[in-house]
Amino acid sequence: MSGKPCDIQLAGIHFTKAVNGADTLATTDAQGRTAFRVGAKKDFFCDPNDNKLSNNTAPILLAKVDNTKPFTLAARVTPGFTAKGLYNAGVLYLYVNDRRWHKPCFEQDERGRHRIVSVRTIGTSDDNNHDVVQGPTAYLKISSDTRTVGSYYSLDQKTWQLVRLYKNDYPAELWAGVSAQCPIDTGATSHFEDIRLTQNSVSDFRLGN
């Protein structure tokens, strides 16, 4: 896998791997709000169309996960949306290597709307656009009971909407992380709050609770 060792504590999570210099781009204030800066044209996508749009330059902070046990990664995400920020997003990750990963995003689309997007990469990436979200902030969550992976979003951290569900066929050593992307514009800063990585899963994969 790409990246280099790091030693960063954010909201009680020990991030020990930094991809594309992520360890130099995330800072946390006294209130526990993490600002994640990202430069121009930074994205993570493996284009299925002859690699024309492939770009694996987005910074990602990663924490090791024991995939033989249940886990849940969640955060309150406020992306750095800008007037020209096509595909700007705040992102959560499950990551094995540059060609095998999954990310749910709160992202700006082609029409300037802000929506939930998910991408799963196995060699190449798919790209799935989900609900449009009103307002600047959404909660994102990834959860596994060792057999199934579910991705969700919420506006109030109480009612969760299922975004994606699939078999957990990842290896025992897995990485979970946070990232920001800015594929088109000159740079942006996304914010993360209430970041949590716990050793349990949702009890209902349809409802996300």
Image (spheres, helix red, strand yellow):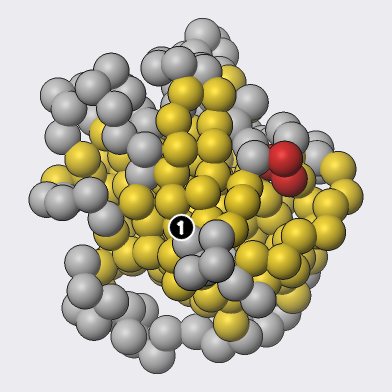
Q: Residue furthest front?
A: 30
Residue 171: percent from left, percent from top = 74, 63
Tell me the quarter of the picture where residue 29 sits: bottom right
Tell me the quarter of the picture where residue 139 sits: bottom left
- Rendered residue at 23%/49% (across/down): 136
The front one of 190 and 94 is: 190
Residue 142 showing in the rendered view: no
- Rendered residue at 88%/50% (across/down): 5
Vertically, is 100 above or below 9?
above
Question: Which quadrant is home to the C terminus?
Answer: bottom left
Please name the amino acid that badge 1 sits on: Phe
Residue 205 showing in the rendered view: yes
Say few, some or many: other residues with alpha carbon within 10 Å of mark 1 (under 14 / 14 to 19 / 20 or more). Answer: many
Badge 1 is on which residue?
A: 192
The front one of 176 and 138 is: 138
Instruction: Count up the numbered dots.
Output: 1
Vertically, is 2 above or below 201?
above
Taking the image as shown, residue 16 lies to the left or right of residue 147, namely right
Residue 117: percent from left, percent from top = 32, 44
Q: Residue furthest right?
A: 5
Question: Which quadrant is home to the N terminus?
Answer: top right
Vertically, is 33 above or below 12?
above
Residue 149: percent from left, percent from top = 49, 68
- Rendered residue at 74%/35% (across/down): 21
Taking the image as shown, residue 166 lies to the left or right of residue 112, namely right
Residue 195: percent from left, percent from top = 51, 69
- Rendered residue at 26%/40% (across/down): 129
The front one of 153 and 191 is: 191
The front one of 171 and 102 is: 102
- Helix, strand or loop for disc 1: strand
Vertically, is 148 above or below 60?
below
